[in-house]
Amino acid sequence: MKVYVVDTHALIWYLEDDPRLGSRAEKIMDDPSVRIIIPTIVLAEIKYLAQKGRIRQSLEDVIRAISLDPRCLIYPIDLSVVHKAPLGLNIHDALIVGTALVQREVVEGVLTCDENIVKTGLVPTVWN
């Protein structure tokens, strides 16, 4: 089973069937044999974006969708993630990368188009 960490935009754009989602990222997220790791910070960011009216999905909508998908695993922000979170990124991106680094043994990459994450070169990224 291939495992990927998903960032906030990728998850929201996938759930909303948004054309901004990269074609490779969409294909991976459609694959029933793929495990999708959702860092807790992604859910916190979704709550914030929904409250600000910047996305259509509510946190409850997202939690409902991922709870119905057995491929999804919510990964906590624990000390190992905090220790692996790289300096120089905003806190959201750092914790997403930290999650991927903690799970480096099994993670194929991060589904993201975030240039800040891509530029670090710390984790493989997948988008188009």
Image: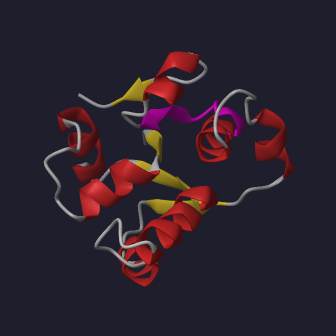
Judge from the rendering whether residue 83 lies leftward or rightward of residue 89; answer left or right.
Answer: right
Residue 67: in magenta span: no
* Color theme of the render: secondary structure
Q: Residue at x 22, y 37 (%)?
A: 22
Residue that extends furthest to the front in the rendered view of this protein: 52
Q: Nearer the viewer, residue 51 or 10?
A: 51
Q: Residue at x 46, y 41 (%)?
A: 4
Residue that extends furthest to the left in the rendered view of this protein: 19
Q: Indicate the quadrant containing the C terminus: top left, top right, bottom left or bottom right.
A: top left
Exactly how many numbered labels are in the figure? Answer: 0
- The picture quadrant where one finds residue 60 is bottom left
Where does residue 33 sit, x and y in percent of width and height?
A: 33, 49
Q: Indicate the quadrant containing the N terminus: top left, top right, bottom left or bottom right.
A: top left
When the figure is inspected, residue 123 is found, relative to residue 102, above or below; the finding is above
Judge from the rendering whether residue 112 lies leftward or rightward of residue 96; answer left or right.
Answer: left
Q: Residue at x 27, y 64 (%)?
A: 15
Residue 104: in magenta span: yes
When the figure is inspected, residue 30 is found, relative to residue 44, above or below; the finding is above
Where does residue 10 sit, x and y in percent of width and height?
A: 35, 48
Where does residue 21 sit, x and y in percent of width and height?
A: 23, 44
Judge from the rendering whether residue 71 lies leftward or rightward of residue 24; answer left or right.
Answer: right
When the figure is inspected, residue 88 is found, relative to residue 36, above or below; the finding is above
Q: Residue at x 53, y 61 (%)?
A: 45
Q: Nearer the viewer, residue 103 or 32?
A: 103
Q: Nearer the viewer, residue 87 or 80?
A: 87
- The picture quadrant where one finds residue 104 is top right
- What residue span does the magenta drawing correspond to? 101-111
Where does residue 88 sit, x and y in percent of width and height?
A: 70, 27
When the figure is inspected, residue 57 is found, relative to residue 36, above or below; the finding is below
Judge from the rendering whether residue 108 lies leftward or rightward of residue 88; answer left or right.
Answer: left
